[in-house]
Image (tube, rainbow, N blue to C red):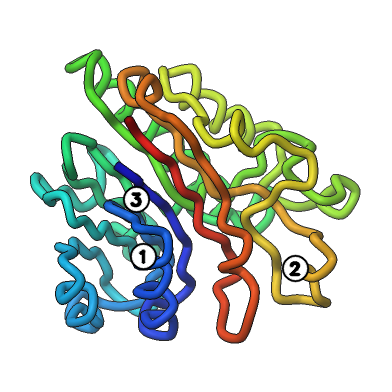
Amino acid sequence: MRIATWNVNSVRSRIDRLEAFLKRQDVDVIALQETKARDDQWPLMGLEAMGYEVATYGVDQWNGVAVASRVGLDDVERGFDRMPEWGDPPGAEARAIGATCGGVRMWSLYVPNGRKPDDPHYHYKLAWLAALRDAATRWLTDDPQARVALTGDWNIAPRDEDVFDMAAYAKSTHVTPPERAAFEAVVEAGYADVVRPFAPGPDVFTYWDYYRQRFERNRGMRIDFVLASPALAEQVTGATIDRDERAGTGASDHAPVLVDLA
C-alpha cells in the first residue's frame, strides 16, 4: 500500500494536479493540508470517479485538511481530544482529521504556523503540539499494535539540515528550540520519522517559498513528515519526496511525501 501527504495549498486551485498526481504515483491513501475549502466546496467528482472516498474538514477559506482513500475510509474523526482552539471567541480550526484506511489510522495534520516567536499564535502552536503528543501517546497506550500515521505539514524543521541556511531563520519560527522539542516529544512518544532514512539530507526539502526563485535555487525547508507508530514503521519498505510535483505552472509550494508499506 502506498500512502502520501501533501500540503496542496488550495484544493480547488489544484484539483487537476492532485488527480494527475494520484494516477501517476498510484497512491492508495493521501492526507491533504491547507485545502482552503469548506466541506460543501470540495471538488469531489473526479476523485470519486477514480475510486476514492474522501473525508474533509473545512470551515472557511483558511486551513482545511482531508483524507482520500481507495482502500476504505472508516471512523472519521475531525480534530483530536483536547485540541486547542484559536480566535476571538475561541473555536476549533480545521487542522486535524483522522480516518482508518486499509488498516492504517491515517491522520492529516496541519500544525499552526506560529507566525513569530512570542506571538500568541506561537504559544497556540506549542499548546497544539503538546495536545497532539498527549493524544498520540494515548493511542499507543490503548493499543500498542496500532498502525498509526501522523502525516502532514508540521511547520517545524527539526534539524539544522532541514533548512537551506540556519542564519536566514535566526529570528523566525519553525526552528526554535521549543518547536523542535515539541516535535521530538512526539517522536519520543513512539512515532518514527520513516522518510528520512530513505531521503537523507542535507539539501533535501519539502517546501520552497514562491519568493525569489527559492525552488529553482533549492533554498527550502523540510517541514512535511510521516511519523509512524512502531507497528506501522516495521512495514515501511520505502519513501520518497516527489520534488517534481513542486515544479511547473500552478504548483503548490510544498512537495508530496510518499511512503510504501508492505
Along the line of sight, the residue nearer the viewer: 243 or 162:
243
Q: Alpha-carbon distance for marks 2 and 3?
A: 25 Å
The image position of residue 102, as x and y in percent, is 17, 41
Along the line of sight, the residue nearer the viewer: 97 or 225:
225
Q: Amino acid at mark 2?
A: Phe
Q: Nearer the viewer, mark 2 or mark 3?
A: 2
State which quarter of the image contains the N terminus.
top left
The image's mark for residue 22 is: 1
Q: Is residue 122 above or below residue 7?
A: above
User: Quadrant of residue 146 in the image?
Assistant: top left
Residue 88 visible in the current orientation: no
Q: Amino acid at mark 1?
A: Leu
Give the residue pinned by disc 3: 108
Give the residue pinned by disc 2: 215
The image position of residue 16, as x and y in percent, is 39, 82
Q: Could you tell which of marks 2 and 3 lies nearer the N-terminus? A: 3
Q: Could you tell which of marks 2 and 1 lies nearer the N-terminus? A: 1
Q: Secondary structure at mark 1?
A: helix
Along the line of sight, the residue nearer the viewer: 157 or 51:
51
The image position of residue 48, as x and y in percent, is 16, 73
Q: Left or right of 171: which side holds 85?
A: left
Q: Left or right of 96: which side holds 133?
A: right
Q: Residues within 10 Å of mark 3 (few under 14, many from 20)?
A: many
